[in-house]
Image (cartoon, grey):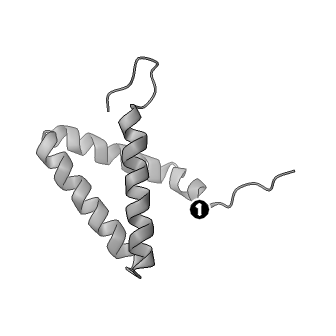
Amino acid sequence: MQQDAMGGAPEDLSHAGSVVDKAIEYMIEQHIAPISIASALLGGALGLLARTMDDRAVAAVLRNALASVESGELAEARQPPPAQA
C-alpha cells in the first residue's frame, strides 16, 4: 500500500473501506450467511491482488494477514467496546 505524504493510509482506502462496509451490510440484510459473504470478499480480493501484484507480493500480503490473526488483532475486534464513563 502506498502511503500519503504524512505517512498515513491513502484517502481512497477509507473510501474503499466504506463501500465494502455498505456492501456487507446489504448482504447481511439479504440474509446471506456471513461465511458466504466473507468467502466472496476474500475470493474477490485475492483475484484483484493476483491481477495487480506478482505472486511474492500476494504471499507477503497473506503472511501479514496471518500474522494479524496469530497476534490476536482479530480477537481484539470481537471484544465489546469499553463502557463510557
The location of residue 33, given as percent across then percent down, is 39, 79
**Quadrant housing residue 58:** top left
SS class, disc 1: helix
Residue at 43% from the left image edge and 51% from the top image edge? 18
Q: Is residue 49 left or right of residue 71?
A: left
Residue at 68% from the left image edge and 61% from the top image edge? 80
Q: Residues within 10 Å of mark 1 (few under 14, many from 20)?
A: few
The residue furthest top is: 5
The residue furthest right is: 85
The location of residue 85, given as percent across then percent down, is 87, 50
The location of residue 68, given as percent across then percent down, is 45, 48
Query: How many numbered circles does the render carry?
Result: 1
Q: Is residue 78 left or right of residue 48?
A: right
Comparing 1 with 4, the one in front is 4
When the figure is inspected, residue 80 is found, relative to residue 31, above or below; the finding is: above
Q: Which quarter of the image is occupied by the N terminus?
A: top left
Residue at 23% from the left image edge and 44% from the top image edge? 59
Residue under label 1: 78
The location of residue 29, given as percent across then percent down, is 45, 77
Residue at 80% from the left image edge and 56% from the top image edge? 83
Circle 1: residue type: Arg
Comparing 64 with 39, the one in front is 39
When the figure is inspected, residue 84 is found, relative to residue 64, above or below; the finding is: below
**Quadrant housing residue 77:** bottom right
